[in-house]
Image (tube, grey):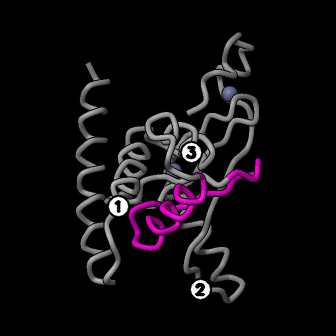
């Protein structure tokens, strides 16, 4: 079953993130908090590109004492110490994805069901750099987002609205 190994790798990633966050906080003389740990574990458990409000709902179902502001603050902290990367696609929601050990990638976003697919293409990467060079630019970073409808939505599958990642 691939499901259990995914689950396992998410737990490993969460544990590694907690260690990293812990030392990052210690270096700065900041306190650890159990609430923050719950947020980090929940975030990694959800996998993929997690909308902050979705994370808030999940965390508060586990522990209603965690405030919305704490979740937002914690995710900003994770971005600051390089554990998570914030993403903002056309729907205006802030999403976070785990950063640790991952290469650069771009995104395909389904405007029908909200599905987000990651891709990497060496030719596209090279071409972008070449285009920039042609204009005298040196590229530091880029984000490529392709919007459209996924295979499921194009087939008109019922229930695809529930298939959000
Ligand atoms: Zn779709
Ligand atoms: Zn991604």
Does the beta carbon of the residue at mark 3 sit less than 8 Å from ligand 2? no
Front residue of 89/133: it is 89
Label 1: few (<14), some or many (≥20) within 10 Å? few
Dot placed on the residue nearer the N-terminal end, 2 or 3: 3
Q: Tell me the distance, in whole angstroms, between the alpha carbons under discs 3 and 1.
A: 17 Å
Q: Nearer the viewer, mark 2 or mark 3?
A: 3
- Residue position for label 2: 138
Q: Is the shortest distance between ligand 2 and the CB of mark 1 under 8 Å?
A: no
Nearer the camera: disc 3 or disc 1: 1
Q: Residues within 10 Å of mark 3 (few under 14, many from 20)?
A: many
Count residues near mark 2 (Cα–Cα under 10 Å), then give few for <14, some for 14-19, many for 20+: few
47, 137: nearer the viewer: 47
Relative height, residue 104 to residue 54 (above, below): below
Real-space CA distance between mark 2 and mark 1, rounded to the nearest whole angstrom: 42 Å
Quadrant of the rendering where the N terminus is positioned: top left
Does the magenta segment cover residue 78?
Answer: yes
Q: Nearer the viewer, mark 2 or mark 1?
A: 1
- Pointer 3: what residue? 56
- Which quadrant of the figure has residue 127? bottom right
Give the extent of the magenta segment: 68-93
Q: Is residue 64 magenta?
A: no
Q: Residue at x 44, y 46 (%)?
A: 43
The residue wearing badge 1 is 33
Secondary structure at badge 1 equals loop
| Quarter of image, res 22 | bottom left
- Secondary structure of the residue carrying numbered label 2: loop
Q: Evaluate if marks 2 and 3 touch, with contact meaning CB atoms under 8 Å apart.
A: no
Report helix, strand or loop for mark 3.
helix
């Amino acid at each position: 079953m691939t499901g259990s190994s995914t689950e396992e790798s998410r737990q490993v990633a969460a544990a590694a993130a907690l260690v990293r966050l812990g030392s990052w906080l210690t270096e700065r003389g900041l306190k650890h908090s159990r609430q923050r740990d719950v947020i980090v574990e929940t975030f990694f458990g959800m996998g993929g590109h997690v909308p902050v409000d979705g994370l808030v709902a999940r965390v508060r179902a586990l522990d209603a004492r965690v405030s919305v502001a704490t979740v937002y603050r914690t995710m900003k902290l994770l971005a600051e110490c390089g554990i998570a990367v914030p993403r903002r696609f056309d729907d205006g929601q802030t999403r976070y994805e785990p950063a640790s050990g991952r290469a650069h990638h771009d995104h395909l976003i389904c405007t029908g069901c909200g599905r987000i697919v990651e891709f990497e293409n060496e030719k596209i990467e090279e071409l972008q750099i070449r285009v920039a060079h042609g204009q005298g630019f040196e590229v530091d970073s880029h984000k490529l987002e392709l919007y459209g409808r996924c295979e499921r939505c194009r087939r008109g599958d019922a229930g695809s609205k529930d298939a959000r990642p």
